[in-house]
Amino acid sequence: PDTSDEVEKVIENGSARYSLPESIRSLDWLKTNGHCVDNIEAGPSTIPAAGRGAFATRHINKGSVISVSPLLLFHREHFKMKVPDGRQTQQLATNYCFGHPRSTLLFFPYAPLVSLINHDSKLPNAEIRWFKKNGEDNSDM
């Protein structure tokens, strides 16, 4: 804040709300643009030694959206690292990114629980779908 009046706003509303005044949306805005993300929860995997996974909290119809997520875009080079013996390897975070092997770019979804969504590679029951913002032409997706 640059003025004492602005300091009062920070004290009254909090620093996050002051820094991001558009972060709280109206119910109408949420009905038009929001997505419910409470249809999955984290839990221990049913596969031994597989860690955690995302599990449905209710029935999800075939073809339905499981979750939505904003994406962070990274250059693949950002995930390279050297191990003590001098070899070059990738950071574990690449396991949670999407990208084509011949592309230099990786997409990292960062919504709650999205990184825990797994499926059987031989009999998949989920897919990744890319889409543009509401109202944009999706014919090339």
Image (cartoon, helix red, strand yellow):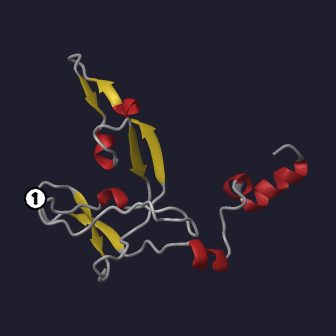
Decide which of 64, 95 is in the foreground and name it: 64
Decide which of 124, 10 is in the foreground and name it: 124
Q: Position of residue 64 (x, y in %)?
A: 35, 76
Q: Position of residue 15 (x, y in %)?
A: 70, 53
Residue found farthest to the front:
139
Q: Does residue 97 sit above or below 12 in this rendering? A: above
Q: Secondary structure at mark 1?
A: loop
Q: Position of residue 88 (x, y in %)?
A: 26, 23
The N terminus lies in quadrant: top right
Disc 1 residue crowd, few under 14, some 14–19, many 20+, Cα 10 Å: few
Q: Is residue 58 left or right of residue 19?
A: left
Q: Does residue 9 sit above or below 75 in this rendering? A: below
Decide which of 7, 61 is in the foreground and name it: 61
Q: Position of residue 53 (x, y in %)?
A: 25, 62
Which residue is drawn at the image coordinates 36% and 33% (left, top)? Answer: 79
Q: Is residue 61 left or right of residue 140?
A: left
Decide which of 85, 14 is in the foreground and name it: 85
Q: Which residue is mark 1?
A: 48
Q: Does residue 66 sit above or below 2 in this rendering? A: below
The C terminus lies in quadrant: bottom left
Residue found farthest to the top:
86
Which residue is drawn at the image coordinates 68% and 75% (left, top)? Answer: 26
Which residue is drawn at the image coordinates 51% and 61% (left, top)? Answer: 132
Type of the residue with mark 1: Pro
Q: Does residue 101 sit above or below 117 in this rendering? A: above
Q: Give the number of marks.
A: 1
Q: For residue 134, which quarter of the picture?
A: bottom right
Q: Is residue 88 left or right of residue 76?
A: left
